[in-house]
Image: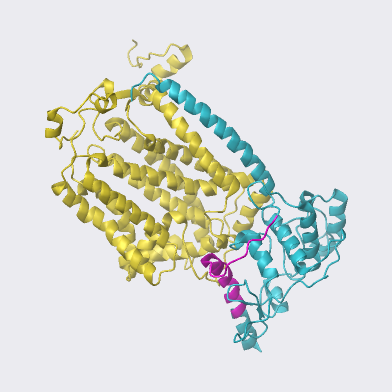
Chain colours: A cyan, B yellow
Amino acid sequence: MLRTSFKALALALGLFAAAPAHAAGGDIAIPDRKFSFDGVFGTYDRASAQRGFQVYKEVCSACHSLRLVSYRNLRELGLTEAQVAAIASQFQIVDGPNDEGQMFERPGRPADRFRKPFANDAAARAANNGALPPDLSVMTKARAGGADYLFALLTGYVDPPPGVTLMDGMHYNKYFPGHQIAMGAPINPDQVEYADGTKATVEQMAHDVSTFLQWAAEPELEQRRALGVKIIIFLTILAGLTYAVKRKIWADVEH
Amino acid sequence: MSIGLHNSEFKNPVVRWIDQRMPVFTMMQKEYGTFPTPKNFNYFWNFGALAMVTLMIMIATGIFLSMHYAAHTGLAFDSVERIMRDVNFGWLIRYVHMNGASMFFIVVYIHIFRGMYYGSYKAPRELLWMLGVVIFLLMMATAFMGYVLPWGQMSFWGATVITNLFSAFPVVGNFIVELLWGGFSVDNPTLNRFFSLHYLLPFVIFGVVFLHVAALHITGSNNPLGIEPKGPQDTLPFHPYYTAKDSVGLVVYFIVFAVLVFFAPNYLGHPDNYIPANPLVTPPHIVPEWYFLPYYAILRAVPDKLGGVLLMFGSILVWFVLPWLDRSPVRSMRFRPLARIFFLLWTVCFLVLLWVGAKPAEGTYVLIARIATAYYFAYFLVILPLLAKFERPLPLPESISRPVLGGGPLPAGAAAKPMEKA
């Protein structure tokens, strides 16, 4: 029993560790997925990101934390203050100690960080056959390929090709480095019911949650690009002026 | 003139009062106003000023980052992400600092290339050159320790690999490593002392930069022709001519910098550094930041640990003696047909090492790294000393003004003294 769980732990550690390096090595080509935030002027598709949040909340958050994001941040996705407060209050947050020295649970507030599914890593491993579901806060920055990789991974579950024997408790994925992943296919058709009537196919849900997680990892992206455009326009004009000044100053020098 | 007071030429009474007692205005006017500067600089001569500006940007952004950063293994990663998310324009400050390190190395590499190509290291500028090498070594130490601070996977494992290199030295090796670690592995004491030193070293760099500039203002600048100015007709006052020219380079440089910061801030980084450090999980490929890759390639090209470490340090220490390895009296490679080819080949080798340093140390990559390493050292230790003896340089122009003014064919005397020293 102890040996089995140790093996599973070692395996999970090994696989999680292998992921980024292999991706960096580029031995598995990640297909390019068209996202609203691609390119220089791309922005977040708010509707898609909101649906992605629903997928995260109803599916991913059973195992994966998002510890660097607060409920208040959801305002940036277009939710109202009341909606954010309502969402936060659905979660019981441990707070305290109170006047008697006891920790207590209270409904979440917008200022709280997203509630973690497990109290600590050991609890997370115990519930997941020894594997540690990684935190998703900066996931698109922590994997080569970013959101493209997330989408590919979520839609990359297939039957193992003939001749490949999976280890105990592992699943075959086309895009996971080494192809054996501890996480089973996380999303199934119609697993969530979208309020806006969008059909909840696996592809749609994977696309939406990838958009949401890209936003979670880089909430500054839109502001950054907008500021960047202004600054580069300003600098280009300044470069022209500076060059003109330089020409004028050097006009009397033969060189 | 009152005795003991400086004879100031400034008219403004306040400036004059200060200048008489402490002639900083006279000094600035002499060193950055009227300072005679060769009139034939090309845009390669922008890069010293660019490096100076980058150093100031790094210090400014670094001070603001340190107001929000927590140097503790349990807090560092999250405090950096807090800067990215909750500090006003924290993402901008951090991305400027992070990419500023890369820009600093790009600028300094071009500055060093310029110095090597135009022979700026030769007499009488040997000390100026050596101070530059000191600055570069300090920059490497600072950048390495800075990369450890976010406490991601590459921070931790990069720190582990690089600090472990010192254990290769006999007798003192382990002592040095434990001194760096502050314990028996890379841990909280390591992070704390690296943060402290990362804050300290930029100010040391600033001090050495001051010496670098002080030495420069004694010998004066080299120039693309590599011959000394013969008189006022060959020089221009630094201001407004070179303040204007440096400004052009600076704005263009800012555009490149801005593209990186605003549109590809993580392009030069490694995704693994967004995974919090975990001493129990080793990434299969540990790679340093791109600017260390040439030396990393040299380290791995040698099958012996101590040999690799010595060669890696030697690859930069050899720059210190470059003025004495290259005995040719002709500075600029424009007039050295053979050295020019060998040097450009050396530059290619440097870039090959940079590329191969990011590849796994196996198969053909090892062979490529070994050939490039061999040439890297052969250029300094064999080719340059021999060229000084056997190369026939092209005739040097008589003065800086002459080729610029296009004064017809050179007089016979110019060709007859190609080995003219200054």
Query: Relative to B17, does residue A227 appear above or below in the rendering?
Result: below
Residue B2 falls left or right of residue B97: left
Instruction: Say above or below: A217 vs A154.
Output: above
Farthest front residue in view: B408
Say which residue appears at 52% left-offset and 60% top-offset.
B155
Seen in the image, is B262 located left or right of residue B336? right
Which residue is pictured at 18% across the width and 49% down the height? B387
Q: How many labels does the image show?
A: 0
Magenta segment, principal secondary structure? helix
In the rendered image, which quarter is residue B304 located in? bottom left
Is residue B87 or residue B328 the one in the foreground?
B328
Q: Residue A166 placed where, x, y %?
A: 63, 84
Residue B232: percent from the left, percent from the top? 27, 20
Which quadrant of the rendered structure holds the N terminus of chain A?
bottom right
Name the side, left or right, on which B226 lies relative to B415.
Answer: right
State the image coordinates of residue A170 (x, y, percent, origin top left): 66, 81
Which is more toward the observer, A129 or B108? B108
Q: Quadrant of residue A101?
A: bottom right
Q: Residue at x 65, y 45 (%)?
A: A224
Residue B36 spot, x, y in % from top left? 32, 24
Q: Which of A159 and B347 is in front in this view?
A: A159
Q: Nearer the viewer, residue B248 or B26?
A: B248
Q: Answer yes or no: is residue B100 visible.
A: yes
Q: In which quarter of the image is the C terminus of chain A?
A: top left
Left or right: residue A137 compared with residue B202? right
One can see residue A135 in this view: no
Whether the magenta-drawn stretch holds residue B137 is answered as no
Residue interval drawn in magenta:
A11-35
Location of residue B279 by image quarter: bottom right
